[in-house]
Image (cartoon, coloured by chain):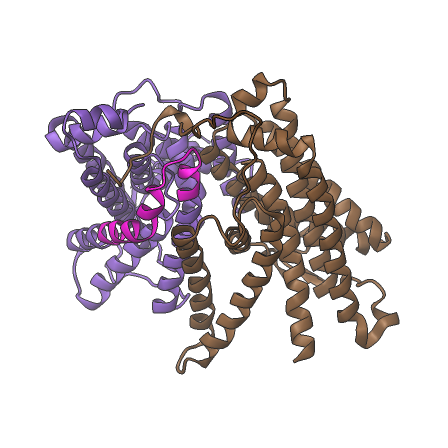
């Protein structure tokens, strides 16, 4: 029983680590730009496809594949943001964030269908050697999945260093905290907004590539996960970067433990319930005490 | 060709009902409901299951509207204090959960196979003219609903609702029950969605979870935006424009050589999404502008520009 429980815990952490990257992206974009960008799901899918193409046609190995996934999703994120969403953000009113959120769903739909148009709706797997699962004290751990966990945590740490040590990172936190004050200090919000979108969508792309390596990629990969990604982000407070990582890991574990009482088909239900409970009981997220980008 | 037009016209009628609901809840009440499609599915399944159990069709339709409204009001009550963008996430998730239930509760909904053979009203009596009958019935219903909503929104209720949309605190200070108004507006929207779902179910006589996906929500947002988010006439015009666009894109995509079925379908979805983005950018007020109501005072107050969560969105213009 105990090993079963530990196995669920490990599986949950692995799922959570994959979710953490897009959740980080979502949180970063929300913090700096002030709206919920639903197109993070499509960028995750785009990253998965970019990685898959790089791996199967160029025969690249893991690290270059992930870098390509980051760059492609990040660049696509910035370009589509400038084309589709930025003109709508320019009309400031009380309803603007909501309008942008609605349009970002349309953008998500457009990108998803662009993927479907280009690659068909089939499943695409990577051409990578499958490592054998390890067994540690009765708990099964996939080497690839362990790798994913390390990469996700590594990226989160890098991001944390970027935000606490570099000038650009600090400027970004300043914008997230208070746009007007940041502008007063000579920080230009638009450039930072682009950078936030680039990093945020890039992270989603890496998450998509890692996910695709673990399983496969198809046009709906991102949309299937969107509720889980949002759950991670919302549980973490939607503006706290460490919160997003912790929230995603927590959602992964809760989702796996939920399998004890729920049929697997209802795994999204735990995400929805977590979102609802967090928003109702503590809208600032359960990790709002943690340091990082905060309101 | 005639039967094709009749079919498209009937679908436009369903969309018009959905759009009228969205105009009431979103345009007039400021309540975002990205789970619109969830309530459509709820209504469709309620009606289909009740009619399968032998209840007369008119009872099924009323039940569909009532069940959707009740669930809508309950959801709106639970999330009553949430900001707009949080409401967007929750409603989107809610529709997804409903679809999961439709797919997995096979004992009730037959899962992804869907429910077929849903009886249509008077179909055996009318024979050939049944589609015409359904078209006229649907649009008569649209007319009645639009008329009633028009009366409602011109009444003090409508003014209070718009006040809640524009500034909750001022509406509350003026003695309006903000929560009740929100619940009513959301409930009306949900009820109309449920009714449209029921009408759809009995028209095509087949429903499955795949019918009720998030794309439909985007369609309706497009219809409402094209027409003008706050206007009932806009909802009706927008729905007709939506169906015209959907059908035109079908022919255009099919005319491009060398595309397979998946590519044609994805091209159409892409076109719809692109249109919504373009309309939002180029003409967000739609075909029918919002009408401003002036108070008797001579000096007009500048519109409140405060954002959700008391912080401004990054303003690209500066």
* Rendering coords of residue B301 (x, y %): 46, 26
Left or right of A15 on screen, residue B242:
right
Look at the image and tell me whether residue B169 can be seen: yes
Q: Quadrant of residue B116?
A: bottom right
Image side of residue A254 versus residue B178, left or right: left
Residue at position x 40%, y 27% from top? B306
* Letter of the purple chain: A
- Say which residue appears at 25% left-offset and 40% top-offset: A152
Is A89 contained in the magenta span? yes
- Residue sitting farthest toward the bottom: B257
B295, B46: nearer the viewer: B295
* Magenta stretch holds residue A147: no
- A6 lies above or below B8: above
**Dividing the image into 4 quarters, which one contains the N terminus of chain B?**
bottom right
The quadrant of the rendering that contains the C terminus of chain B is top left
Image height check: is B318 above or below B143?
above
Q: Residue at x 66, y 52 (%)?
A: B17
Q: Residue B3: which quarter of the image?
A: bottom right
Q: Colour of chain B?
A: brown
Q: Position of residue B78 (x, y in %)?
A: 59, 28
Q: Does B191 sit left or right of A57 as displayed?
A: right
Which stretch appears magenta?
A73-100
Q: Quadrant of residue A72?
A: bottom left
Q: Which one is nearer the viewer's eye here, A218 or B2?
A: B2
């Amino acid at each position: 029983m105990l090993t079963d429980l530990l196995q669920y815990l490990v599986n949950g952490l692995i799922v959570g680590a994959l979710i953490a990257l897009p959740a980080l992206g979502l949180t970063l974009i929300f913090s700096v730009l002030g709206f919920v960008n639903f197109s993070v799901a499509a960028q995750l899918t785009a990253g998965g496809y970019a990685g898959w193409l790089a791996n199967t046609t160029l025969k690249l190995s893991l690290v270059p594949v992930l870098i390509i996934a980051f760059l492609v999703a990040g660049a696509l994120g910035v370009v589509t943001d400038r084309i589709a969403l930025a003109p709508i953000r320019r009309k400031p009113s009380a309803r603007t964030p909501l309008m942008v959120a609605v349009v970002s769903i349309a953008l998500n739909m457009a990108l998803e269908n662009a993927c479907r148009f280009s690659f068909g709706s089939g499943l695409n797997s990577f051409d990578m050697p499958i490592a054998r699962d390890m067994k540690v004290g009765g708990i099964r751990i996939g080497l690839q999945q362990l790798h994913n966990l390390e990469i996700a945590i590594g990226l989160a740490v890098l991001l944390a260093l970027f935000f606490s040590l570099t000038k650009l990172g600090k400027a970004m936190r300043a914008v997230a905290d208070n746009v007007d004050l940041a502008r007063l200090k000579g920080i230009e919000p638009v450039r930072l907004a682009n950078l936030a979108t680039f990093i945020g969508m890039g992270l989603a792309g890496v998450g998509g590539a890692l996910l695709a390596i673990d399983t496969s990629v198809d046009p709906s990969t991102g949309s299937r996960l969107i509720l889980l990604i949002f759950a991670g982000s919302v549980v973490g407070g939607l503006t706290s970067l460490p919160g997003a990582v912790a929230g995603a890991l927590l959602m992964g574990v809760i989702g796996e433990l939920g399998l004890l009482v729920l049929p697997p088909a209802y795994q999204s239900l735990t995400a929805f319930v977590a979102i609802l409970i967090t928003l109702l009981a503590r809208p600032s997220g359960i990790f709002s005490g943690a340091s990082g980008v905060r309101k | 060709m005639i039967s094709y037009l009749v079919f498209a016209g009937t679908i436009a009628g369903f969309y018009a009902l959905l759009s009228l609901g969205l105009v009431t809840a979103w345009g007039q009440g400021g309540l975002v409901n990205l789970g619109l499609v969830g309530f459509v599915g709820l209504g469709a399944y309620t009606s289909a299951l009740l009619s399968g159990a032998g209840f007369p069709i008119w009872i099924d339709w009323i039940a569909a509207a009532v069940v959707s409204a009740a669930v809508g009001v309950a959801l709106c009550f639970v999330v009553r204090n949430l900001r707009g963008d949080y409401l967007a996430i929750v409603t989107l998730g809610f529709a997804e959960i409903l679809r999961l239930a439709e797919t997995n509760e096979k004992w009730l909904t037959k899962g992804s196979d869907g429910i077929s053979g849903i009886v249509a009203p008077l179909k055996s009596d009318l024979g050939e003219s049944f589609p015409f009958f359904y078209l006229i019935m649907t649009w008569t219903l649209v007319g009645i609903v639009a008329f009633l909503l028009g009366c409602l929104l011109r009444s003090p209720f409508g003014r209070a609702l718009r006040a809640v949309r524009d500034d909750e605190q001022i509406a509350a200070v003026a003695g309006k029950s903000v929560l009740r108004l929100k619940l009513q507006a959301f409930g009306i929207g949900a009820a109309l969605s449920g009714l449209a779902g029921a009408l759809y179910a009995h028209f095509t006589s087949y429903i499955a979870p795949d019918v009720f996906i998030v794309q439909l929500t985007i369609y309706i947002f497009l219809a409402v935006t094209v027409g003008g988010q706050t206007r009932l006439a806009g909802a009706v015009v927008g729905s007709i424009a939506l169906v015209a666009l959907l059908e035109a894109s079908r022919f255009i995509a099919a005319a491009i050589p060398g595309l397979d079925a998946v590519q044609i379908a994805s091209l159409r979805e892409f076109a719809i999404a692109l249109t919504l983005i373009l309309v939002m950018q180029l003409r967000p007020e739609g075909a029918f502008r919002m009408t401003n109501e002036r108070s008797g005072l001579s000096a007009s107050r500048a519109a409140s520009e405060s954002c959700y969560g008391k912080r401004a969105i990054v303003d690209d213009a500066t």
